[in-house]
Amino acid sequence: MASIILPANPSESRPGRFGVYGGRYVPETLMAALMELERAYEIAKADAAFQAELNELLTDYAGRPTPLYFAKRLTESLGGAKIYLKREDLLHTGAHKINNSLGQGLLAKRMGKKRIIAETGAGQHGVATASACALLGLECVIYMGEVDMERQELNVMRMRLLGAEVRGVGSGSKTLKDAISEAMRDWVTNVRTTYYLLGSALGAHPYPTMVRDFHRCISREMKAQILEKEGRLPSAVVACVGGGSNAIGAFYEFIPDRQVRLIGVEAGGRGTVLGEHAARFQGGVPGVLQGTYSYVLQDDDGQIALTHSVSAGLDYASIGPEHAMLHDTGRAEYVSQDDAAALDAVKKLARTEGILPALESAHAVAEAIRIAPTLPARDILVVNLSGRGDKDMGILARELKL
Amino acid sequence: MPIRFNHKPGLVVYLTAGDPSLEATREIALAAIDEGADVIELGVPFNDPVADGPIIQRASERALARGTRLKDVLVLCREIRAARPNSGLVLFSYLNPILRYGLSKFADDAASAGADGVLATDMIVEEAGEYLAEMTRAHLAPIFLAAPTSPDERLEAIAAHSVGFVYAISRTGITGKQQSLAVDAAALVARIRRFSGSDGTRLPVAVGFGISNADHVAQVAEFADAAVVGSAIVELIERSTPETAAGAVARFIKGLRLPQTALAR
């Protein structure tokens, strides 16, 4: 068991800590930039003009609020709880990621940074960031693992068309983790001129807090919409968890509502052996990866484990620190769905509702498909449909033999 | 024993432990000490080395491919300590392998293996409460990095918490060789000096990142106590065979103290 590093004074609840998780574990060179970012974000957060500008973009450019849609045919075909879909897939660029890319893009501009770097797994954060940079007139460099570039080729072309430079990362597992490390190496080298637009609720403080704040709108809208449609809160909110940005956005406003179950769905991949999945709460141990203390899939020497998922966006060895806390306190439950279940869920949703979910989001749909028939008809499940599946057509064509 | 720099300038040699093998790393370390390296930094290989450039990334991959583990690095440390009782030995690691080993057990075992100090690349002073307590308890010197981007108040905390020496990063960026020494370096060392104590008890400052030839070492001598040479030596080892590496490193280190070209100033 790893020892837990506590703040010097544990009674002091410091910003950036989620219970014992989170914090800042980075090379010293980045500390000044993280502190500058923390200050700039605090000021922007409290600035009505910043919030108004962001809200205008979220509304007129990105398409918020997104609908909360009652999936009647899916519900009827399963028999059991009512299933609602929060349609983040309808947002501009095709996923929830644009909420954060616009927020941080505006922040970077306020800070006078002209060069933006970002990592991407499935390419959705890369496309969202490339779009935000085009809109705001910022230079954009995206790091992406070579394995991911191949399996999400369409998004690579979208990013290039949007004016971003996509740099392939050939080290390690050539996926999201390696893209983050390469982005961190760029940042540590060009820290004085460059803004690192991290795309998940991961990394060193203030990123997990800031990214969550930019996605809070998901659960804020969900809550108002379900109260309007049903006059009560849902029984459960279900979301897929890679780094955890869409899930924390979907959970956050419901955390005080203890009667609402919060269910995070990790990638079960193709097996339960280390290396075959990305289920951090089933085999992960607390540790430090890429700036934050959280659950990490690793071997018994502390080397980061390889991961596998059919969905590039969930294929990551660690998880956002706030999820680690929600897991330990029992406020949220974390389960996993494997590749096959996710693929079945894509097909099921496509055939019953005419909606093609991203492979990442399909993991949440798969969990809803599993539990809905076990629940009474008066129960309500809200599934955060974090992205759309157009980007996955290559994989789907191969896996589903289309 | 306390870390001492017996040469002017002092020389810190970084080696990725287990590249090309643990035996070879031991021979290289002993040769380096015999050529006047004051401190050996034994790098614990890690498979997500965010602060390292391609040369040390490749060395880490080779060491891990051979199955090098943290406990093996501790054995190596013990062997080097037994063979050279007076040299400085520092364990250089990313945090995660240390946490997985167990912070407290690591401190005990590092001390009993004869390590003088520990440098954890991704440990900053604000997060170091329990880490510092364990280092102190085990009589290990915690060494922190200082960067050109660190504001004065951070340098003050870094100097206050470091024991043995402060590792000043010569430039923003990752590890690797470079043509010329960054102008950042002298300014950073001067800023650290304001917080690193007065003459008699002054905490030494070592400058690293990109130091790859005798000119660089001579320049560092003008404003700092020691130079850290890492990637240049790791690359030399990469180009050598396991049998020739120790000799090649010894010749390289000898050359570092004999500037071959006059300084252009």
Image (cartoon, grey):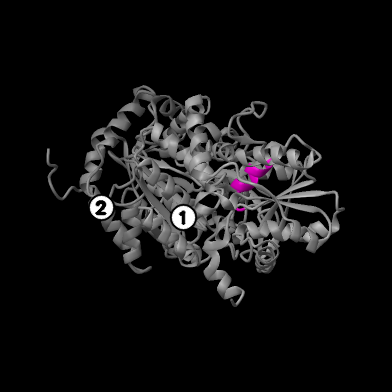
Residue drawn 46% across the image and 38% down it: B143
Q: Position of residue B257 (x, y in %)?
A: 23, 47
Q: Position of residue A39 (x, y in %)?
A: 47, 28
- Please provide the residue range marked out in magenta: A242-251
Residue drawn 22% across the image and 40% down it: B219
Do we see residue B39 in this rendering?
no
Q: Secondary structure at mark 1?
A: helix
Image quadrant in which the C terminus of chain A is located: bottom right
Q: Chain of mark 2?
A: B
Magenta stretch holds residue A249: yes
Closer to the camera, A367 or A1? A367
Q: Amino acid at mark 1?
A: Ala
Residue drawn 23% across the image and 53% down it: B255
Magenta stretch holds residue A311: no
Q: Chain of mark 1?
A: A
A370 on left or right of A1: right
Q: Amino acid at mark 2?
A: Lys
Position of A155 relative to A180 (above/below)? below
Q: Which numbered tag is attached to residue B254?
A: 2
Q: In the orientation shown, which residue stands out farthest toward the right?
A: A376
Label 1 crowd (10 A; few <14 / some 14-19 / many >=20) = many
Same chain, labels 1 and 2: no
How far is the residue under mark 1 from the one under mark 2?
A: 39 Å
User: Magenta span: helix, strand or loop, mainly?
Assistant: helix
Closer to the camera, B222 or A178? A178
Q: Position of residue A217 (x, y in %)?
A: 61, 38
Foreground tag (1 vs 2): 1
Q: Secondary structure at mark 2?
A: helix
Q: Which numbered tag is attached to residue A179?
A: 1
Residue drawn 61% across the image and 58% down it: A360
Where on the picture, by quarter, is residue A216?
top right
